Amino acid sequence: MAKYDIIMIGGGAGGFAAAIKASELGAKAVIINGGLPIGGTCVNVGCVPSKILLEVGSELYNSQHPRFKAVRNEPSSNFDFETAIGEKDELVASLRQSNYIRIAAELKIPVIEGRARFISPQQIEVAGQTLEADKFIIATGSRPRILPFKGVDKVTYITNREALSLSRLPESMIVIGAGPIGLEFAQMYARFGTKVTVLEKEKQILPLAEPEIANELQRCLEEEGIEIHTGVDIEELGEAGNLKIVTARIGKKPISVRGEQLLLATGVAPNSNDMGLELAGVKVSQRGFIEVDENLRTSAPHIWAAGDVVGKTFLETVAAKEGYIAAGNALEGTKKAIDYDSVPKAVFTDPQVASVGITEEEEMRRLNTCACRTLEIALVPKAMAIKETRGLVKMAIHPETQVILGVHMVAPMAADLIHEATLAVKYKLTIDDIVDTVHVFPTMSEAIKRVAQSFKRDIATMSCCVE
């Protein structure tokens, strides 16, 4: 029976980050990978392949809808859906090899393929072997959550995983769920030429986003021809011939939507089932997420957990950070924690959505008061110059100290722009710290400075570079 200092159960970002930390500390380690190919969700069925196809859709859409009069649009017949899927597959395979398989080999950390199951607090069984370790990191990730809609077991549906590898471009698609995944795939396929209808149960798309941000993004998506319905109660799923049928209600109004493909984007479920966690003394929540303390330690003192299976936030970057910290806490006895308020998040629609820190609602809950300002991207000179004026930036500050507590935006390149705001939230900068910092002109990043300035002056009456 092989014995290790630490075993990483999960071969995605969390598991690999933990393995890298273990290697740095000289620990004898092994990675157990079951389910998705090595690399986990991000490189295989998440961030990487979806962003490749989103960029394909963006290039296709922009070529047909030029912003400048001097640029003539290209015919849509230039698009080859099968080639786009094939190119995506090639890039994913290349990144899986270079970023995971190669790294594990260079670190001399073995990778065992198979689903691990605890058979005692210190032992797991995988691929016919029994392995023992002093410490464990569980980073088994998540999978698409399928809600128990009436008829779901009788209809052929897809999740984001299958939507990345369709053999043929559908003429129409129904997307249930208007969170980040649902909206990214809705716009992706709409730009490929599919007629897309989005159905969302909550009163707004991106239910966790600031209402102004969600409303502006919905306006932008609807301008591109995506049909969006919110406040939808799904009554039944059905199928007739090659069409999927969703019967629903919006308030008292019945609706029926038909589409060639039905994409369920209704959240994620943790990969914590059938692992024998009860034999290891690891507690899970009612929804199956592994319960951890602020140091990512589970109810079993020798086991830590990281990534989607913990359910703090579903981001590859957070999974990696958690995995690295968990391994350090496990092997060094440290008690490091993550400040989740300073973790940036992004949705890769066009325009993009990005946020960091707390919302206005959360500020009201914590302080019973708020100080917020919203700036239209149209007031940023660079946006006017490049004719990309869609979007908003909203900033929440502490009403007394003027420390920046949260920044939320829907804007071109928002996922890149959010990092100045992230540093502001992380290091508790004030609006004066941002205003006093000279920014390059003209840039989209001036949006952060301008929204900070809006707390003290009327931006609409300000010249370009005024402090």
Image: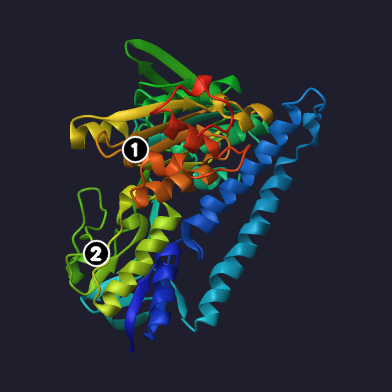
Residue type for callout 1:
Leu
Taking the spot 49% from the left edge, 32% from the top edge, the residue there is: 450
Q: Position of residue 314 (x, y in %)?
A: 38, 50
- Placement of 264 over or under 30, stated as above or below: above
Taking the spot 29% from the left edge, 62% from the top edge, the residue there is: 274
**Residue 48 in view:** yes
**Does dot 2 land on a helix, a strand or a loop?**
loop
Q: Nearer the viewer, residue 341 or 370?
A: 370
Q: Around disc 1, counting alpha carbons within 10 Å, would you say few (fewer than 14), some (14 to 19), or many (20 or more)?
A: few
Residue 149 falls left or right of residue 13: left
Looking at the image, is mark 2 or mark 1 earlier in the sequence? 1
**Comparing marks 2 and 1, which lies closer to the viewer?**
2
Q: Position of residue 292 (x, y in %)?
A: 22, 60
Q: Nearer the viewer, residue 100 or 362?
A: 362
Q: Are marks 2 and 1 in contact (CB under 8 Å)?
A: no
Q: Nearer the viewer, residue 266 or 380?
A: 380
Q: Nearer the viewer, residue 449 or 364?
A: 449
Name the quadrant containing residue 200: top left
**Does dot 1 land on a helix, a strand or a loop?**
loop
Residue type for callout 2:
Asn
Inter-mark Cα distance, 2 to 1: 31 Å
Q: Position of residue 50 (x, y in %)?
A: 57, 46
- Point out which mark residue 295 bears: 2
Specify the color scheme: rainbow
Taking the spot 36% from the left edge, 85% from the top edge, the residue there is: 27
In the rendered view of the protein, which quadrant contains the N terminus?
bottom left
Q: Would you name the residue on which mark 1 appears?
A: 147
Q: Around disc 2, counting alpha carbons within 10 Å, would you say few (fewer than 14), some (14 to 19), or many (20 or more)?
A: some
**Residue 313 in view:** no
Name the quadrant containing residue 215: top left
Taking the spot 45% from the left edge, 63% from the top edge, the residue there is: 13
